[in-house]
Amino acid sequence: MYWLFNTDEAEPEGKGTYQLMLKQSCIAAWGTSYDADDLLAKPLSGDHVFFYVDKVGIVAKATFTASAPFSSNSIFGKQKEGEFHRTVVNLVRPKKGPLSYTLVYKQTGYHLPVKGLALCRIHDAVAATKIAGLF
């Protein structure tokens, strides 16, 4: 199964944080309006995730481990309540640079669901496989 993770770069709190996530081999979410730990618990071990950066595109792909989400403040800092992380492995970047929204659409016919969601499952298996093939 494939997931799309929006790294939150459009928010002031998220500027540059995707680089920390890649360095720490994790995805991270925060917030008290929803339970970040419950959200990050949805993918199963072995599921794949694409890291999406606002106005850049997909910058990495990784695989979820069996580890549960854990509380930490190493990405967004102490100013954000409810920060949780989920560990990933096999982190790779696209060979030819970030995969822009437009490039993904042209290659797959799939519109990436990047607005308003931190983490969502990609239900179009053919498109997800094609995106993975761009790595």
Image (tube, rainbow, N blue to C red):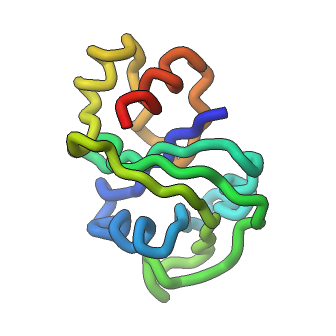
**Residue 105, image x and y in percent?**
32, 18
Location of residue 38 with respect to 94 vertically, above or below: below
Q: Is residue 42 visible?
A: no
**Residue 126, image x and y in percent?**
54, 15
* Position of residue 135 in the picture relative to residue 44 (left or right): left
Which residue is rendered at x = 62% and y = 66% of the image?
Answer: 87
Quarter of the view holding residue 99: top left
**Residue 41, image x and y in percent?**
74, 55
Which residue is rendered at x = 61% and y = 60% of the image?
Answer: 33
Closer-to-camera residue (94/20): 94
Location of residue 65 with respect to 56 vertically, above or below: below
Quarter of the view holding residue 8: bottom left
Quarter of the view holding residue 38: bottom right
* Position of residue 84 in the picture relative to residue 57 (left or right): right
Which residue is rendered at x = 52% and y = 24% of the image?
Answer: 129
Q: Is residue 82 visible?
A: yes
Which residue is rendered at x = 63% and y = 64% of the image?
Answer: 86
